[in-house]
């Protein structure tokens, strides 16, 4: 068995995931511009969403609330995100991720599927550093559809040098 496979385990969750997001951390307008230039996407179209989320953030007593500005681009055939927390405790701050660096690699769970409850605590043999559910969005599609998300960030930094994020779609109940 390959050593990496041994560390990752044989989680059936891995069959639900597809690596489809690379996120960079920004802490200012200047950071956002520099990331866009670095990626040669400074003239590209970006989808924006401001998100309020609540849930667990390591080191915070009780439920934490944070607000983030998210910018998305799809020109590379993968979702490129620029993530900028505006308020509240968050994993890039706790993990001291420098501005301009990769914040995480993201895995969307297949539409209509969910992470099994028994697997919520540990995936990739690593603990959760942040798990939040979005409460509100400013993106019109998400407002109209009522979709929210559960973001679970696993502390894979000791293993991979970056965090891994599992993104679950929480569709509105339309009937």
Image (spheres, helix red, strand yellow):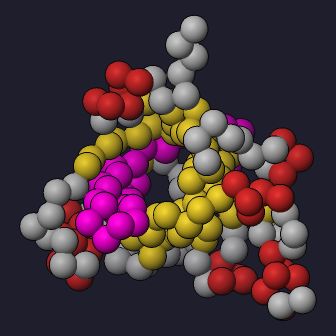
* Label total for image: 0
- Viewer-proximal residue, 59 or 97? 97
State whether residue 125 is above or below residue 88.
Answer: below
Residue at 45%, 37% (x, y): give it. Answer: 52
The image quadrant where one finds the N terminus is bottom right
> Looking at this rendering, what residue extends furthest in the top direction?
175
Q: Quadrant of residue 79?
A: bottom left
Residue at 25%, 78% (x, y): give it. Answer: 39
Magenta segment: 60-85
Residue at 58%, 33% (x, y): give it. Answer: 170
Q: Quadrant of residue 140?
A: top left
State whether residue 4 is above or below residue 110.
Answer: below
State whether residue 8 is above or below residue 78.
Answer: below
Residue at 25%, 49% (x, y): give it. Answer: 47
- Viewer-proximal residue, 31 or 124? 124
Decide if residue 57 is in sight here.
Answer: no
**Residue 149, position in %: x, y?**
54, 39
State whether residue 15 is above or below residue 150.
Answer: below
Decide if residue 70 is in sight here.
Answer: yes
The image quadrant where one finds the C terminus is top right
- Viewer-proximal residue, 168 or 68? 168
Q: Is residue 159 left or right of residue 53?
A: right
**Residue 172, position in %: x, y?**
53, 21
> Looking at this rendering, what residue extends furthest in the left direction?
43
**Residue 17, position in %: x, y?**
65, 59
Magenta highlight: main SS: strand
**Residue 13, position in %: x, y?**
77, 57
Is 29 within the magenta?
no
Is 78 within the magenta?
yes
- Viewer-proximal residue, 77 or 134? 77
């Amino acid at each position: 068995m390959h050593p990496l496979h041994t560390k990752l385990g044989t989680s059936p969750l891995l069959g639900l995931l597809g690596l489809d997001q690379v996120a960079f951390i920004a802490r200012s307008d200047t950071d956002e511009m520099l990331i866009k230039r670095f990626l040669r996407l400074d003239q590209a179209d970006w989808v924006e969403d401001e998100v309020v989320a609540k849930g667990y953030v390591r080191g915070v007593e009780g439920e934490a609330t944070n607000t983030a500005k998210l910018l998305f681009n799809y020109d590379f055939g993968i979702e490129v995100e620029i993530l900028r927390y505006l308020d509240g405790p968050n994993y890039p701050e706790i993990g001291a991720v420098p501005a301009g660096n990769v914040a995480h690699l993201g895995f969307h769970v297949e539409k209509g599927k969910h992470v099994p409850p028994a697997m919520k605590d540990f995936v990739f043999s690593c603990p959760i550093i942040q798990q939040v559910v979005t409460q509100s969005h400013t993106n019109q599609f998400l407002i109209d559809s009522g979709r929210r998300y559960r973001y679970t960030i696993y502390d894979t930094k000791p293993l991979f040098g970056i965090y891994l994020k599992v993104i679950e779609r929480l569709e509105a109940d339309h009937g």
